[in-house]
Image (spheres, grey):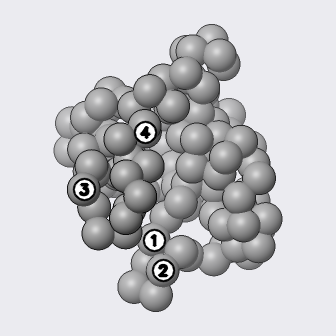
């Protein structure tokens, strides 16, 4: 599914998977289990809900294409500053401080 979404939106599938792995605690978070939200995507009322994992992956990839890649934000550190900014109000425990290193570690483990 990551390969399909990556091809559709022109994003490295390993990067999509790495972000999803980091955002979901390697697939263990309630967001992915209960809401099919692989990217930790937030809406007006908190975590967004998707009808399937495939839809969640597609929406994450579409979001990255439109709001990041199309705006020149293509590296993990560039994406982090907008996707998971340090000091964000929805990150009271400071987990965003680990976003670059976590996503990078997963990306490298996937051959990226």
Most foreground residue, 92 or 86: 92
Which element type, helix, strand or loop, lies under badge 3? Answer: loop
Cα separation, mark 4 vs mark 3, equals 12 Å
Quarter occupied by residue 52 = bottom right
- Disc 1 or 3, which lies upstream in sequence? 1
Residue bearing mark 1: 42
Q: In what quadrant of the picture does the N terminus appear?
A: top right
Residue bearing mark 4: 99
Identity of the residue drawn at 28% across and 51% down: 85
Most foreground residue, 65 or 39: 39
- Disc 4 or 1, which lies upstream in sequence? 1
Q: Residue 86's x, y, as percent?
A: 27, 49
- Density class for disc 1 (Cα within 10 Å; few <14, some 14-19, many ≥20) is few
Residue that extends furthest to the bottom in the rendered view of this protein: 45
Quarter occupied by residue 3 = top right
Identity of the residue drawn at 76% across and 73% down: 34
Which element type, helix, strand or loop, lies under badge 4? Answer: helix
Quarter occupied by residue 55 = bottom right
Residue bearing mark 2: 46
- Density class for disc 3 (Cα within 10 Å; few <14, some 14-19, many ≥20) is few
Identity of the residue drawn at 63% across and 77% down: 49
Q: Residue 94's x, y, as percent?
A: 37, 52
- Disc 2 or 4, which lies upstream in sequence? 2
Q: Is residue 13 left or right of residue 11?
A: right
Cα separation, mark 4 vs mark 1, equals 16 Å
Cα separation, mark 2 vs mark 4, equals 19 Å
Residue bearing mark 3: 87
Cα separation, mark 1 vs mark 2, equals 5 Å
Cα separation, mark 1 vs mark 3, equals 16 Å
């Amino acid at each position: 599914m990551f390969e399909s979404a990556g091809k559709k939106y022109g994003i490295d599938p390993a990067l999509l998977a790495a972000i999803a792995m980091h955002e979901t605690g390697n697939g263990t978070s309630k967001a992915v289990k209960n809401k099919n939200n692989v990217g930790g995507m937030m809406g007006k009322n908190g975590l967004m809900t998707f009808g399937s994992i495939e839809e969640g992956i597609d929406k994450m990839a579409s979001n990255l294409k439109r709001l990041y890649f199309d705006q020149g934000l293509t590296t993990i550190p560039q994406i982090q500053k907008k996707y998971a900014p340090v000091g964000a109000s929805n990150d009271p425990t400071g987990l965003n401080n680990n976003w670059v290193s976590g996503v990078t570690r997963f990306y490298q483990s996937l051959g990226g």
